[in-house]
């Protein structure tokens, strides 16, 4: 992965994650290891939290598509390794809320994922 081409987004916009049982299974220990590392990384990289959470939902029955999605997140991190959060201690905090009205977020069970 050292020489992998960096991705500009952690997930492809046109792809939807699903429980596709027709695709080939991958080694669950490798996939769980990658997801565990990404979950640890979400403490400082909040921009990947949602994508990693979606990938973590497929740890039990992971397929090649899910493995490629996890690798894409790693490629995104490779390209944004110099990004970070800056917390300034003397500013006031303004809380802004966001609501996603995608009522059928997950096509597998038709539950909201946000």
Image (spheres, rainbow, N blue to C red):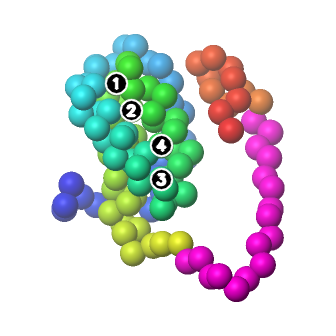
Horizontal relation, residue 66 to residue 86: left or right = left
**Measured along the vertical axis of the image, is residue 89 above or below residue 14?**
below
Answer with the quarter of the image where residue 104 lies: top right
Q: Which residue is mark 2?
A: 66
In 3D space, how far apart are the residues under numbered discs 2 and 3 (Cα atoms)?
18 Å
Q: For the view shown, which residue lies furthest in the top direction?
A: 21
Which residue is at 27% across, 25% downward?
A: 28
Return the x and y of residue 42 as percentages of the image width and height. Answer: 48, 53
Residues shaded magenta? 86-102
In 3D space, how far apart are the residues under numbered discs 1 and 2 (Cα atoms)?
5 Å
In the foreground, 85 or 17: 85
Return the x and y of residue 79 as percentages of the image width and height. Answer: 36, 66
In the foreground, 46 or 55: 46
Callout 4: SS: helix
Q: Which residue is mark 3?
A: 42
Return the x and y of residue 90 as percentages of the image width and height. Answer: 70, 86
In 3D space, how far apart are the residues under numbered discs 3 and 1 (Cα atoms)?
23 Å
Asked whether the residues under the numbered discs 3 and 4 touch, taking CB atoms below 8 Å apart as contact, a structural biologist would say: yes
Answer with the quarter of the image where residue 58 lies: top left
**Mark earlier in primary sequence (1, 4):** 4
Q: Which residue is mark 1?
A: 63
């Amino acid at each position: 992965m050292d020489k992998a081409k960096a991705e500009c987004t952690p997930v492809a916009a046109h792809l939807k994650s699903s429980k596709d049982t027709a695709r080939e299974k991958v080694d669950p220990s490798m996939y769980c290891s990658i997801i565990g590392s990404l979950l640890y990384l979400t403490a400082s990289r909040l921009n990947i939290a949602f994508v990693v959470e979606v990938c973590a939902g497929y740890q039990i029955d992971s397929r090649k598509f899910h493995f490629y999605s996890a690798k894409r997140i790693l490629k995104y991190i490779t390209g944004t390794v110099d990004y970070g959060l800056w917390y300034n201690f003397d500013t006031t905090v303004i809380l802004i809320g966001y609501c996603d009205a995608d009522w059928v977020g997950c096509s597998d069970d038709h539950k909201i994922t946000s």
